Image (cartoon, helix red, strand yellow):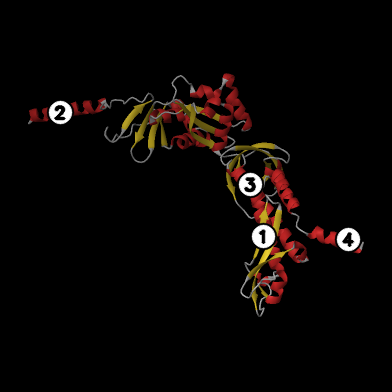
């Protein structure tokens, strides 16, 4: 009975090829890790385990895994020598002939190794290598999954809020492809309350590799969040019929969105607003009540800048050559509206258009013009206004001429 038990115990220590490949296939189905990757990692683990107990073996140990035959065999190469200096890589002629009767000095024999001969520490080493390989594979797949979702919107569940910094951790994804993502306090909308268990739509700013797995950086303040929300609500933007040209945002307060359509029959602004304002209202609701101004993009800088200062009316826009700057004239009663509270409207218009905007009331004294070649004056419609000399100059000239004639008469 004892002999049968020992034989059974020895057999259980053998590496069963059929079970080996069945286990790898199950890992592939459950975790999505390719069989080729797992075979590579497991063979590395077996080699590491053998080297753990045989430090001088070097690169003489190999593993052959044949899925078709269902076999996994491990070999070590040994040179047949007269005097053995390194038992890990050399063997005597007597030992060689015990394995192969026709062996001669100088031959290289491949000796099969059985996993049951591994020591306890070597077996633990093999186990750690396999587990580490599986973790690296899972992290690599998660990184690839979320790296493809950079600059997209994802929905996450808040798992933790740091009471000191206010930073939040979110669980994004589902199943084995879910991961913890980081929403810094500076990427949260001011005044927005975040609590554990909340579901949030977040913008994926960046995905980084780290020793602990992929690090996903999120934002609720990024202008891209507004663009993606409109893509979800407005089919014309998603399909490309309406194009979002530029976005300027001060998260939690106000956003300006410039849209344009190459098709004349498509109303870009109307498409974004939607029937009864439903589309834009859905975006505003998701942003917690943030105001959204939708304006029409124009290739004419004057028209574009005038539209960007909405809801204020604009009398004229003068583009200046020194850098991308302009001078805007508005009615006196529209000055505060054009500038906005704490300069917000003008600031967002400048971000949206890329121009430095100098706003002047219509009653302000006219500044000296540098000539039509250096500066061009545009009205709201983009037409050039003719420059007419001030009437006061003509009257002064006539008066000087009359005085000169009187002096000549007296002389």
Q: Where is residue 221 in the image (x, y as percent from the top left)?
A: 58, 39
Which of these two is toward me, 191 or 338?
Answer: 191
The residue positioned 40% from the left and 27% from the top of the image is 303
Q: Could you tell me if the residues under marks 1 and 2 are in contact, i.e. CB atoms within 8 Å?
A: no
Which residue position is annotated with label 2? 401
Q: How far apart are marks 4 and 3 (CA)?
A: 46 Å
Q: Which of marks 4 and 3 is nearer the N terminus?
A: 4
Q: How far apart are marks 4 and 2 (CA)?
A: 135 Å
Q: What element carries label 1?
A: strand
- Of badges 1 and 2, nearer the viewer stands 1
- Of badges 4 and 2, nearer the viewer stands 4
The residue positioned 72% from the left and 60% from the top of the image is 126
Q: Earlier in the sequence, mark 3 or mark 1?
A: 1
Which residue position is annotated with label 1? 63
Which residue position is annotated with label 4? 4
Q: Is residue 71 above or below residue 345?
A: below
Q: Earlier in the sequence, mark 4 or mark 1?
A: 4
- Of badges 4 and 3, nearer the viewer stands 4
- Mark 4: few/some/many CA within 10 Å (<14, 14-19, 20+): few
Q: Where is residue 180 in the image (x, y as percent from the top left)?
A: 67, 46
Q: Distance between the residues labelled 1 and 2?
A: 111 Å
Which residue position is annotated with label 3? 141
């Amino acid at each position: 009975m004892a002999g049968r038990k020992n034989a059974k115990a020895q057999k259980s220590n053998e590496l069963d090829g059929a079970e080996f490949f069945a286990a790898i296939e199950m890992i592939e189905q459950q975790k999505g890790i390719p069989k080729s990757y797992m075979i590579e990692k497991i063979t590395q683990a077996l080699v590491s385990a053998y080297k753990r107990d045989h430090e001088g073996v070097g690169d003489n140990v190999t593993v052959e895994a044949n899925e078709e035959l269902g076999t996994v065999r491990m070999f070590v190469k040994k040179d047949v020598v007269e005097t053995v200096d390194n038992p890990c890589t050399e063997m005597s002629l007597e030992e060689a002939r015990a394995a192969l009767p026709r062996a001669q000095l100088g031959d290289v024999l491949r000796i099969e190794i059985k996993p049951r001969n591994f020591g306890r520490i070597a077996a633990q080493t093999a186990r750690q290598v396999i587990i580490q390989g599986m973790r690296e594979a899972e992290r690599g797949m998660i990184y690839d999954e979320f790296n493809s979702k950079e600059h997209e919107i994802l929905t996450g569940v808040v798992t933790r809020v740091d009471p000191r910094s206010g930073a939040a951790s979110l669980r994004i994804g589902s199943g084995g492809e879910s991961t913890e993502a980081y929403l810094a306090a500076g990427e949260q909308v001011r005044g927005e309350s975040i609590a554990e268990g909340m579901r949030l739509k977040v913008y994926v700013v960046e995905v980084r590799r780290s020793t602990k797995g992929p690090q996903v950086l999120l934002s609720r303040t990024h202008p891209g969040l507004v663009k993606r929300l409109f893509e979800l609500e407005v089919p014309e933007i998603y399909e490309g019929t309406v194009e979002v040209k530029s976005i300027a945002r001060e998260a939690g307060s106000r956003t300006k969105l410039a849209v344009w359509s190459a098709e004349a029959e498509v109303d870009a602004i109307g498409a974004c607003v939607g029937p009864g304002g439903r589309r834009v209202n859905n975006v505003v609701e998701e942003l917690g009540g943030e105001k959204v101004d939708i304006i029409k993009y124009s290739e004419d800088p004057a028209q574009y800048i005038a539209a960007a200062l909405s809801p204020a009316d604009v009398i004229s826009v003068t583009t200046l050559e020194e850098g991308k700057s302009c001078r805007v004239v508005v009615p006196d009663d529209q000055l505060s509206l054009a500038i906005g509270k704490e300069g917000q409207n003008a600031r967002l218009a400048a971000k949206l258009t890329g121009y430095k905007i100098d706003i002047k009331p219509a009653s302000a004294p006219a500044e000296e013009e540098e000539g039509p070649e250096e500066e061009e004056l545009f009205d709201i419609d983009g037409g050039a206004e003719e420059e007419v000399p001030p009437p006061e100059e003509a009257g002064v000239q006539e008066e000087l001429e009359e005085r000169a004639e009187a002096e000549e008469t007296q002389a």
